[in-house]
Amino acid sequence: MSAAPDVLSRGASRPRSARGYASGKEDYLRRLRKVEGQVRGLQKMIEADAWCPDVVIQVASATRALQEVAVGLLNDHLRHCVIAAAADCPADGDERLAEVAATIRQVIRL
Amino acid sequence: MSAAPDVLSRGASRPRSARGYASGKEDYLRRLRKVEGQVRGLQKMIEADAWCPDVVIQVASATRALQEVAVGLLNDHLRHCVIAAAADCPADGDERLAEVAATIRQVIRL
Amino acid sequence: MSAAPDVLSRGASRPRSARGYASGKEDYLRRLRKVEGQVRGLQKMIEADAWCPDVVIQVASATRALQEVAVGLLNDHLRHCVIAAAADCPADGDERLAEVAATIRQVIRL
Amino acid sequence: MSAAPDVLSRGASRPRSARGYASGKEDYLRRLRKVEGQVRGLQKMIEADAWCPDVVIQVASATRALQEVAVGLLNDHLRHCVIAAAADCPADGDERLAEVAATIRQVIRL
Protein backbone atom coordinates (compact mmCIF):
# COMPACT_ATOMS: atom_id res chain seq x y z
CA MET A 1 0.00 0.00 0.00
CA SER A 2 1.44 3.34 -0.94
CA ALA A 3 0.28 6.79 0.09
CA ALA A 4 -2.81 7.74 -1.87
CA PRO A 5 -2.15 10.27 -4.68
CA ASP A 6 -4.48 12.81 -3.06
CA VAL A 7 -2.39 12.71 0.11
CA LEU A 8 0.77 13.31 -1.90
CA SER A 9 -0.76 16.31 -3.65
CA ARG A 10 -2.88 17.72 -0.84
CA GLY A 11 -0.28 20.30 0.14
CA ALA A 12 0.33 21.22 -3.49
CA SER A 13 -1.09 24.69 -3.09
CA ARG A 14 1.38 25.38 -0.30
CA PRO A 15 4.86 26.74 -1.05
CA ARG A 16 6.72 23.72 -2.35
CA SER A 17 10.40 24.26 -2.12
CA ALA A 18 10.61 24.91 1.61
CA ARG A 19 9.34 21.94 3.57
CA GLY A 20 10.30 22.29 7.21
CA TYR A 21 12.03 18.92 7.20
CA ALA A 22 14.06 19.63 4.04
CA SER A 23 17.42 19.70 5.76
CA GLY A 24 16.67 16.48 7.67
CA LYS A 25 15.10 14.61 4.76
CA GLU A 26 17.83 11.99 4.48
CA ASP A 27 17.70 11.36 8.22
CA TYR A 28 13.92 10.83 8.16
CA LEU A 29 14.22 8.49 5.20
CA ARG A 30 16.92 6.51 7.00
CA ARG A 31 14.76 6.20 10.12
CA LEU A 32 11.71 5.17 8.13
CA ARG A 33 13.72 2.52 6.26
CA LYS A 34 14.78 1.20 9.66
CA VAL A 35 11.13 1.04 10.81
CA GLU A 36 10.27 -0.74 7.55
CA GLY A 37 12.95 -3.29 8.43
CA GLN A 38 11.52 -3.67 11.93
CA VAL A 39 8.06 -4.34 10.49
CA ARG A 40 9.51 -6.95 8.15
CA GLY A 41 11.31 -8.45 11.16
CA LEU A 42 7.95 -8.65 12.93
CA GLN A 43 6.56 -10.69 10.05
CA LYS A 44 9.53 -13.07 10.30
CA MET A 45 8.92 -13.42 14.05
CA ILE A 46 5.27 -14.32 13.47
CA GLU A 47 6.19 -16.75 10.69
CA ALA A 48 8.77 -18.35 13.01
CA ASP A 49 6.20 -18.66 15.84
CA ALA A 50 8.17 -16.37 18.13
CA TRP A 51 7.13 -16.01 21.75
CA CYS A 52 4.22 -13.61 21.92
CA PRO A 53 5.53 -11.09 24.48
CA ASP A 54 8.79 -10.86 22.50
CA VAL A 55 6.80 -9.90 19.40
CA VAL A 56 4.84 -7.29 21.37
CA ILE A 57 8.06 -5.72 22.72
CA GLN A 58 9.32 -5.36 19.13
CA VAL A 59 5.99 -3.85 18.05
CA ALA A 60 6.34 -1.31 20.86
CA SER A 61 9.85 -0.49 19.66
CA ALA A 62 8.66 0.18 16.10
CA THR A 63 5.79 2.28 17.45
CA ARG A 64 8.19 4.39 19.48
CA ALA A 65 10.45 4.93 16.45
CA LEU A 66 7.44 6.11 14.43
CA GLN A 67 6.38 8.52 17.16
CA GLU A 68 9.91 9.93 17.31
CA VAL A 69 9.57 10.66 13.58
CA ALA A 70 6.19 12.34 14.18
CA VAL A 71 7.53 14.59 16.94
CA GLY A 72 10.60 15.48 14.88
CA LEU A 73 8.45 16.42 11.88
CA LEU A 74 6.10 18.49 14.02
CA ASN A 75 9.03 20.33 15.54
CA ASP A 76 10.58 21.06 12.12
CA HIS A 77 7.21 22.21 10.88
CA LEU A 78 6.70 24.58 13.81
CA ARG A 79 10.19 25.99 13.42
CA HIS A 80 10.23 26.48 9.68
CA CYS A 81 6.64 26.79 8.49
CA VAL A 82 4.42 28.00 11.30
CA ILE A 83 6.66 30.71 12.70
CA ALA A 84 7.54 31.98 9.21
CA ALA A 85 3.86 32.07 8.26
CA ALA A 86 2.98 33.92 11.47
CA ALA A 87 5.69 36.50 10.80
CA ASP A 88 4.33 37.13 7.29
CA CYS A 89 0.68 37.15 8.26
CA PRO A 90 -0.85 36.50 11.70
CA ALA A 91 -4.00 34.96 10.24
CA ASP A 92 -1.95 32.39 8.32
CA GLY A 93 0.00 31.63 11.50
CA ASP A 94 -3.25 31.01 13.36
CA GLU A 95 -4.53 28.70 10.67
CA ARG A 96 -1.32 26.67 10.66
CA LEU A 97 -1.27 26.45 14.44
CA ALA A 98 -4.80 25.09 14.42
CA GLU A 99 -3.62 22.45 11.94
CA VAL A 100 -0.68 21.58 14.22
CA ALA A 101 -2.98 21.28 17.25
CA ALA A 102 -5.27 18.92 15.32
CA THR A 103 -2.23 16.89 14.30
CA ILE A 104 -0.90 16.63 17.87
CA ARG A 105 -4.33 15.36 18.91
CA GLN A 106 -4.07 12.59 16.29
CA VAL A 107 -0.62 11.61 17.53
CA ILE A 108 -1.77 11.53 21.18
CA ARG A 109 -5.06 10.05 20.02
CA LEU A 110 -7.48 12.33 21.81
CA MET B 1 16.97 -4.69 9.54
CA SER B 2 15.54 -8.03 10.52
CA ALA B 3 14.75 -9.32 13.99
CA ALA B 4 17.95 -10.36 15.72
CA PRO B 5 18.45 -14.17 15.86
CA ASP B 6 18.42 -14.13 19.65
CA VAL B 7 14.97 -12.56 19.62
CA LEU B 8 13.74 -15.22 17.22
CA SER B 9 15.05 -18.00 19.43
CA ARG B 10 14.47 -16.47 22.87
CA GLY B 11 11.21 -18.32 23.38
CA ALA B 12 12.73 -21.55 22.10
CA SER B 13 12.54 -23.26 25.46
CA ARG B 14 8.82 -22.60 25.61
CA PRO B 15 6.34 -25.06 24.05
CA ARG B 16 6.68 -24.40 20.35
CA SER B 17 3.70 -25.68 18.52
CA ALA B 18 1.05 -23.73 20.35
CA ARG B 19 1.60 -20.01 20.01
CA GLY B 20 -1.46 -18.10 21.16
CA TYR B 21 -1.76 -16.32 17.84
CA ALA B 22 -1.49 -19.49 15.76
CA SER B 23 -5.04 -19.38 14.45
CA GLY B 24 -4.75 -15.70 13.54
CA LYS B 25 -1.26 -15.91 12.04
CA GLU B 26 -2.33 -15.09 8.49
CA ASP B 27 -4.35 -12.14 9.70
CA TYR B 28 -1.40 -10.71 11.66
CA LEU B 29 0.89 -11.16 8.66
CA ARG B 30 -1.63 -9.40 6.43
CA ARG B 31 -1.88 -6.48 8.86
CA LEU B 32 1.89 -6.20 9.22
CA ARG B 33 2.34 -6.23 5.43
CA LYS B 34 -0.15 -3.37 5.31
CA VAL B 35 1.85 -1.43 7.93
CA GLU B 36 5.02 -2.13 5.92
CA GLY B 37 3.27 -0.56 2.92
CA GLN B 38 2.26 2.43 5.01
CA VAL B 39 5.87 2.94 6.09
CA ARG B 40 7.01 2.75 2.47
CA GLY B 41 4.28 5.26 1.61
CA LEU B 42 5.69 7.56 4.30
CA GLN B 43 9.09 7.42 2.60
CA LYS B 44 7.45 8.37 -0.72
CA MET B 45 5.70 11.29 0.97
CA ILE B 46 8.98 12.58 2.40
CA GLU B 47 10.73 12.12 -0.96
CA ALA B 48 7.88 14.02 -2.67
CA ASP B 49 8.13 16.87 -0.11
CA ALA B 50 4.61 16.25 1.15
CA TRP B 51 3.03 18.74 3.54
CA CYS B 52 4.36 18.04 7.01
CA PRO B 53 1.06 17.64 8.95
CA ASP B 54 -0.16 15.24 6.25
CA VAL B 55 2.92 13.07 6.85
CA VAL B 56 2.36 13.16 10.62
CA ILE B 57 -1.27 12.05 10.23
CA GLN B 58 -0.08 9.04 8.20
CA VAL B 59 2.58 8.26 10.83
CA ALA B 60 -0.17 8.29 13.48
CA SER B 61 -2.23 5.91 11.35
CA ALA B 62 0.65 3.41 11.06
CA THR B 63 1.29 3.72 14.81
CA ARG B 64 -2.33 2.92 15.57
CA ALA B 65 -2.26 -0.12 13.27
CA LEU B 66 0.84 -1.41 15.09
CA GLN B 67 -0.77 -0.93 18.49
CA GLU B 68 -3.85 -2.82 17.30
CA VAL B 69 -1.51 -5.70 16.46
CA ALA B 70 0.10 -5.47 19.92
CA VAL B 71 -3.25 -5.56 21.74
CA GLY B 72 -4.45 -8.45 19.59
CA LEU B 73 -1.31 -10.46 20.30
CA LEU B 74 -1.52 -9.76 24.04
CA ASN B 75 -5.11 -10.87 24.08
CA ASP B 76 -4.35 -14.09 22.20
CA HIS B 77 -1.45 -14.72 24.55
CA LEU B 78 -3.58 -14.25 27.66
CA ARG B 79 -6.29 -16.50 26.28
CA HIS B 80 -4.14 -19.33 25.03
CA CYS B 81 -0.89 -19.27 26.97
CA VAL B 82 -1.37 -17.58 30.32
CA ILE B 83 -4.66 -19.16 31.30
CA ALA B 84 -3.50 -22.60 30.19
CA ALA B 85 -0.25 -22.22 32.14
CA ALA B 86 -2.14 -21.10 35.24
CA ALA B 87 -4.45 -24.09 35.00
CA ASP B 88 -1.48 -26.46 34.80
CA CYS B 89 0.59 -24.76 37.47
CA PRO B 90 -0.25 -21.58 39.40
CA ALA B 91 3.41 -20.57 39.73
CA ASP B 92 3.83 -20.68 35.95
CA GLY B 93 0.67 -18.64 35.56
CA ASP B 94 2.06 -15.99 37.92
CA GLU B 95 5.34 -15.83 36.05
CA ARG B 96 3.59 -15.40 32.71
CA LEU B 97 1.28 -12.74 34.10
CA ALA B 98 4.27 -10.79 35.36
CA GLU B 99 5.70 -10.98 31.84
CA VAL B 100 2.40 -9.74 30.37
CA ALA B 101 2.28 -6.84 32.85
CA ALA B 102 5.83 -5.83 31.87
CA THR B 103 4.84 -6.03 28.22
CA ILE B 104 1.73 -3.86 28.70
CA ARG B 105 3.96 -1.29 30.40
CA GLN B 106 6.19 -1.21 27.32
CA VAL B 107 3.20 -0.73 25.03
CA ILE B 108 1.81 2.10 27.20
CA ARG B 109 5.36 3.31 27.78
CA LEU B 110 5.32 3.64 31.54
CA MET C 1 -18.09 15.13 40.81
CA SER C 2 -18.36 11.67 42.25
CA ALA C 3 -18.64 8.39 40.41
CA ALA C 4 -22.18 7.94 39.16
CA PRO C 5 -24.21 5.48 41.27
CA ASP C 6 -24.70 3.16 38.31
CA VAL C 7 -20.94 2.83 37.95
CA LEU C 8 -20.58 1.98 41.62
CA SER C 9 -23.22 -0.71 41.38
CA ARG C 10 -22.56 -2.00 37.89
CA GLY C 11 -20.45 -4.92 39.10
CA ALA C 12 -22.95 -5.71 41.85
CA SER C 13 -23.94 -8.99 40.28
CA ARG C 14 -20.32 -10.11 40.34
CA PRO C 15 -18.87 -11.87 43.44
CA ARG C 16 -18.33 -9.03 45.88
CA SER C 17 -15.88 -10.01 48.49
CA ALA C 18 -12.99 -10.88 46.23
CA ARG C 19 -11.90 -7.86 44.23
CA GLY C 20 -8.53 -8.52 42.63
CA TYR C 21 -7.08 -5.38 44.15
CA ALA C 22 -8.29 -6.13 47.70
CA SER C 23 -4.86 -6.70 49.18
CA GLY C 24 -3.50 -3.52 47.55
CA LYS C 25 -6.53 -1.33 48.30
CA GLU C 26 -4.71 0.98 50.70
CA ASP C 27 -1.86 1.42 48.26
CA TYR C 28 -4.22 2.36 45.42
CA LEU C 29 -6.05 4.83 47.67
CA ARG C 30 -2.74 6.38 48.68
CA ARG C 31 -1.66 6.75 45.06
CA LEU C 32 -5.01 8.23 44.05
CA ARG C 33 -4.87 10.74 46.92
CA LYS C 34 -1.44 11.74 45.64
CA VAL C 35 -2.85 12.25 42.13
CA GLU C 36 -5.71 14.28 43.62
CA GLY C 37 -3.05 16.48 45.27
CA GLN C 38 -1.24 16.83 41.95
CA VAL C 39 -4.43 17.95 40.25
CA ARG C 40 -5.03 20.52 43.00
CA GLY C 41 -1.41 21.63 42.56
CA LEU C 42 -2.13 22.12 38.86
CA GLN C 43 -5.00 24.43 39.73
CA LYS C 44 -2.67 26.44 41.96
CA MET C 45 -0.13 26.67 39.16
CA ILE C 46 -2.77 28.00 36.75
CA GLU C 47 -4.04 30.46 39.35
CA ALA C 48 -0.47 31.64 39.94
CA ASP C 49 0.13 32.08 36.19
CA ALA C 50 2.86 29.45 36.14
CA TRP C 51 4.95 29.03 33.01
CA CYS C 52 2.98 26.97 30.54
CA PRO C 53 5.49 24.17 29.77
CA ASP C 54 5.99 23.69 33.52
CA VAL C 55 2.25 23.11 33.90
CA VAL C 56 2.24 20.65 31.01
CA ILE C 57 5.12 18.66 32.54
CA GLN C 58 3.12 18.34 35.77
CA VAL C 59 0.03 17.29 33.81
CA ALA C 60 2.12 14.58 32.15
CA SER C 61 3.32 13.43 35.57
CA ALA C 62 -0.26 13.09 36.90
CA THR C 63 -1.25 11.27 33.70
CA ARG C 64 1.57 8.79 34.15
CA ALA C 65 0.61 8.16 37.79
CA LEU C 66 -2.97 7.43 36.69
CA GLN C 67 -1.82 5.02 34.00
CA GLU C 68 0.36 3.22 36.55
CA VAL C 69 -2.80 2.74 38.62
CA ALA C 70 -4.65 1.43 35.56
CA VAL C 71 -1.95 -1.11 34.70
CA GLY C 72 -1.72 -2.23 38.34
CA LEU C 73 -5.47 -2.76 38.53
CA LEU C 74 -5.54 -4.66 35.25
CA ASN C 75 -2.75 -6.89 36.44
CA ASP C 76 -4.47 -7.62 39.78
CA HIS C 77 -7.67 -8.30 37.91
CA LEU C 78 -6.03 -10.75 35.53
CA ARG C 79 -4.28 -12.52 38.38
CA HIS C 80 -7.18 -12.82 40.77
CA CYS C 81 -10.39 -12.64 38.75
CA VAL C 82 -9.76 -13.74 35.20
CA ILE C 83 -7.60 -16.75 35.88
CA ALA C 84 -9.87 -17.94 38.69
CA ALA C 85 -12.92 -17.55 36.48
CA ALA C 86 -11.22 -19.46 33.67
CA ALA C 87 -10.31 -22.29 36.05
CA ASP C 88 -13.93 -22.56 37.18
CA CYS C 89 -15.48 -22.24 33.77
CA PRO C 90 -13.73 -21.61 30.44
CA ALA C 91 -16.67 -19.65 29.03
CA ASP C 92 -16.55 -17.23 31.97
CA GLY C 93 -12.81 -16.86 31.49
CA ASP C 94 -13.36 -15.97 27.83
CA GLU C 95 -15.97 -13.39 28.70
CA ARG C 96 -13.71 -11.74 31.25
CA LEU C 97 -10.76 -11.74 28.90
CA ALA C 98 -12.85 -9.98 26.28
CA GLU C 99 -13.70 -7.36 28.91
CA VAL C 100 -10.00 -6.96 29.77
CA ALA C 101 -9.09 -6.58 26.09
CA ALA C 102 -11.75 -3.86 25.69
CA THR C 103 -10.39 -2.13 28.79
CA ILE C 104 -6.78 -2.22 27.53
CA ARG C 105 -8.00 -0.64 24.30
CA GLN C 106 -9.53 2.22 26.31
CA VAL C 107 -6.29 2.74 28.22
CA ILE C 108 -4.21 2.76 25.03
CA ARG C 109 -7.00 4.67 23.31
CA LEU C 110 -7.39 2.58 20.21
CA MET D 1 0.37 17.32 47.83
CA SER D 2 0.62 20.73 46.24
CA ALA D 3 2.96 21.92 43.52
CA ALA D 4 6.43 22.47 44.95
CA PRO D 5 7.30 26.17 45.42
CA ASP D 6 10.19 25.93 42.99
CA VAL D 7 7.81 24.79 40.27
CA LEU D 8 5.51 27.72 40.99
CA SER D 9 8.37 30.19 40.76
CA ARG D 10 10.46 28.56 38.04
CA GLY D 11 9.05 30.76 35.30
CA ALA D 12 9.40 33.85 37.45
CA SER D 13 12.08 35.36 35.24
CA ARG D 14 9.74 35.10 32.26
CA PRO D 15 7.32 37.95 31.45
CA ARG D 16 4.56 37.48 34.01
CA SER D 17 1.44 39.20 32.92
CA ALA D 18 1.01 37.47 29.60
CA ARG D 19 0.60 33.70 30.06
CA GLY D 20 -0.66 32.14 26.86
CA TYR D 21 -3.60 30.56 28.67
CA ALA D 22 -4.70 33.81 30.39
CA SER D 23 -7.96 34.16 28.47
CA GLY D 24 -8.89 30.51 29.09
CA LYS D 25 -7.80 30.39 32.74
CA GLU D 26 -11.30 29.89 34.12
CA ASP D 27 -11.97 27.13 31.65
CA TYR D 28 -8.78 25.27 32.58
CA LEU D 29 -9.58 25.62 36.29
CA ARG D 30 -13.07 24.27 35.67
CA ARG D 31 -11.71 21.28 33.76
CA LEU D 32 -9.09 20.56 36.43
CA ARG D 33 -11.72 20.73 39.19
CA LYS D 34 -13.70 18.18 37.20
CA VAL D 35 -10.65 15.91 36.96
CA GLU D 36 -10.11 16.34 40.72
CA GLY D 37 -13.70 15.16 41.20
CA GLN D 38 -13.06 12.18 38.93
CA VAL D 39 -10.01 11.21 40.98
CA ARG D 40 -12.06 11.46 44.19
CA GLY D 41 -14.72 9.34 42.50
CA LEU D 42 -12.03 6.75 41.76
CA GLN D 43 -11.17 6.58 45.45
CA LYS D 44 -14.86 6.01 46.26
CA MET D 45 -15.00 3.23 43.67
CA ILE D 46 -11.98 1.50 45.21
CA GLU D 47 -13.39 1.92 48.72
CA ALA D 48 -16.69 0.48 47.54
CA ASP D 49 -14.91 -2.51 45.93
CA ALA D 50 -16.09 -1.56 42.47
CA TRP D 51 -15.54 -3.97 39.58
CA CYS D 52 -11.98 -3.62 38.41
CA PRO D 53 -12.50 -2.96 34.68
CA ASP D 54 -15.08 -0.29 35.59
CA VAL D 55 -12.42 1.46 37.69
CA VAL D 56 -9.90 1.23 34.86
CA ILE D 57 -12.36 2.77 32.37
CA GLN D 58 -12.83 5.73 34.73
CA VAL D 59 -9.05 6.06 35.13
CA ALA D 60 -8.75 6.19 31.35
CA SER D 61 -11.41 8.91 31.24
CA ALA D 62 -9.53 11.07 33.78
CA THR D 63 -6.29 10.50 31.86
CA ARG D 64 -7.90 11.66 28.64
CA ALA D 65 -9.27 14.80 30.33
CA LEU D 66 -5.78 15.62 31.61
CA GLN D 67 -4.24 15.14 28.19
CA GLU D 68 -6.87 17.43 26.67
CA VAL D 69 -5.72 20.07 29.16
CA ALA D 70 -2.07 19.47 28.19
CA VAL D 71 -2.76 19.84 24.46
CA GLY D 72 -4.85 22.97 25.06
CA LEU D 73 -2.09 24.56 27.13
CA LEU D 74 0.56 23.68 24.55
CA ASN D 75 -1.54 25.20 21.82
CA ASP D 76 -2.14 28.42 23.77
CA HIS D 77 1.55 28.58 24.55
CA LEU D 78 2.56 28.19 20.91
CA ARG D 79 0.06 30.80 19.81
CA HIS D 80 0.78 33.43 22.42
CA CYS D 81 4.30 32.90 23.68
CA VAL D 82 6.37 31.10 21.09
CA ILE D 83 5.27 32.99 18.01
CA ALA D 84 5.52 36.33 19.81
CA ALA D 85 9.01 35.48 21.05
CA ALA D 86 10.07 34.40 17.56
CA ALA D 87 8.79 37.67 16.09
CA ASP D 88 10.79 39.67 18.63
CA CYS D 89 13.94 37.63 18.42
CA PRO D 90 14.54 34.45 16.37
CA ALA D 91 16.98 33.02 18.94
CA ASP D 92 14.33 33.29 21.69
CA GLY D 93 11.81 31.64 19.38
CA ASP D 94 14.21 28.74 18.80
CA GLU D 95 14.81 28.31 22.52
CA ARG D 96 11.09 28.23 23.26
CA LEU D 97 10.40 25.81 20.46
CA ALA D 98 13.02 23.46 21.86
CA GLU D 99 11.24 23.66 25.21
CA VAL D 100 7.90 22.88 23.53
CA ALA D 101 9.40 19.90 21.71
CA ALA D 102 10.78 18.55 25.00
CA THR D 103 7.36 19.03 26.57
CA ILE D 104 5.54 17.22 23.76
CA ARG D 105 7.95 14.31 24.23
CA GLN D 106 6.99 14.15 27.92
CA VAL D 107 3.29 14.14 27.05
CA ILE D 108 3.75 11.38 24.45
CA ARG D 109 6.30 9.75 26.75
CA LEU D 110 9.11 9.22 24.30
Image: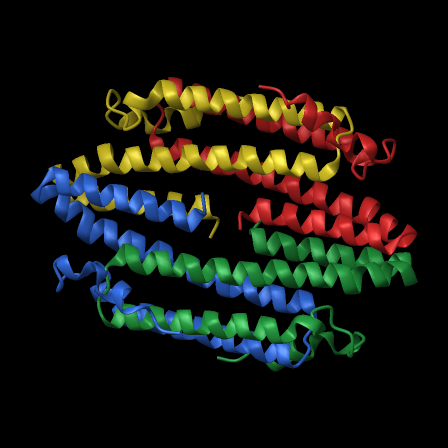
Chain colours: A red, B yellow, C blue, D green
* Count of numbered marks: 0
Task: Please tell me in which quadrant of the rendered image residue B23 appears.
Answer: top left
Residue drawn at (70%, 22%) of the image: B44
Residue B16: % across, % down: 26, 22
The answer to whether one can see residue A48 in this image is no
**B50 lies above or below B16:** below
Residue drawn at (59%, 71%) of the image: D28
Residue A92: % across, % down: 83, 50
Q: Is residue B85 left or right of residue C37?
A: left
Residue drawn at (78%, 65%) of the image: D81
Q: Is residue D60 left or right of residue A64?
A: left
**D14 lies above or below D56:** below
Residue A17: % across, % down: 88, 31
Residue A68: % across, % down: 63, 41
Q: Is residue C47 left or right of residue B63?
A: right
Q: Which quadrant of the rendered structure holds the N terminus of chain B? A: top right
The answer to whether one can see residue C12 in this image is yes
Task: Please tell me in which quadrant of the rendered image residue B46 appears.
Answer: top right
**B76 lies above or below A44:** below
Which of C91 and B43 lies nearest the eye of the viewer? C91
